[in-house]
Image (cartoon, rainbow, N blue to C red):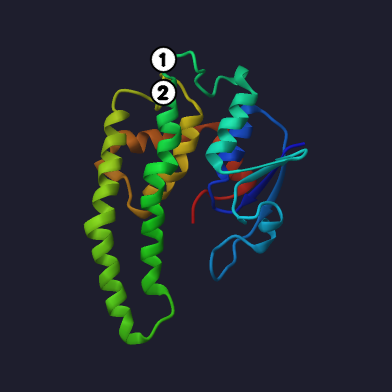
Amino acid sequence: MLTVHHLEKSRSHRVLWLLEELGLEYELKTYQRNPKTMLAPAELKAVHPLGKSPVITTGDMTLAESGAILEWLTEQHPQKALSIPAAEPARADYLYWLHYAEGTLMPLLVMTLVFRRVPKSRMPFFAKPVAKNITRRVIGSYIQPQVDTQLKVLNDHLQQRDWLVADRFTCADIQLSYPLEAAAGRYGLGDAYPALSAYLERLRARPAYQVAIDKGGPVTL
């Protein structure tokens, strides 16, 4: 039996979603975040030394990193056609979008979260205005413009297609879902990116996505 070590409101929603798309049985072990730090609990280090989620275990195998987990699962079940085989011309695009989500888009959203929390941290009262000013400048002059560029590229890419690659739903769409949920929550998509907003709604409408929410809880903080 495959076990998913799932941290609430985290990337591991994608693993639950994929497993539901694949129709596989699995055991779900859910961990709660530390209410003060919002970090994963120490118990996860007993599963993987980094103490992060998602992690899956089956037999003697322990596998971390959502991208690696998604790739491994889809390769184990090629009949479900949620990946692009190496022989197909669209394979390169599939690999790009599969790794783009965490390699390019997600770091910007993590930086946004970290910088927005800085002024809320404990510090002398006279330091708070300085922290707020630095945070505002970093987000406004560096992070926000890059996020805008990424969202525009995605919106343009999805203008004439429903899914990222090969005119069909694949694991790359699942992988991109978490950064998009984070972007929608931290910056908003709204009228500025209509194709991207519609795409996110298509993702949320999939039955397996909704089952993963029912089992694992909300996607993002």
The amino acid beneath tag 2 is Ala
- The numbered mark at residue 89 is 1
The answer to whether residue 24 is above or below residue 11 is above
Q: Residues within 10 Å of mark 1 (few under 14, many from 20)?
A: few
Residue at the (36%, 73%) spot, across then down: 119
Disc 1 element: loop
Disc 2 element: helix
Residue at the (29%, 54%) spot, across then down: 143
Q: Nearer the viewer, residue 146 or 162?
A: 146
Question: From this viewpoint, is residue 210 visible?
Answer: no
- Residue 97 location in percent, x, y? 41, 32
Q: Quadrant of residue 126?
A: bottom left
- Contact (CB < 8 A) between labels 1 and 2? yes
- The numbered mark at residue 219 is none
Q: Nearer the viewer, residue 213 or 56?
A: 56
Q: Which residue is mark 2?
A: 92
The amino acid beneath tag 1 is Pro
Q: Quadrant of residue 91?
A: top left
Residue at the (38%, 86%) spot, across then down: 124
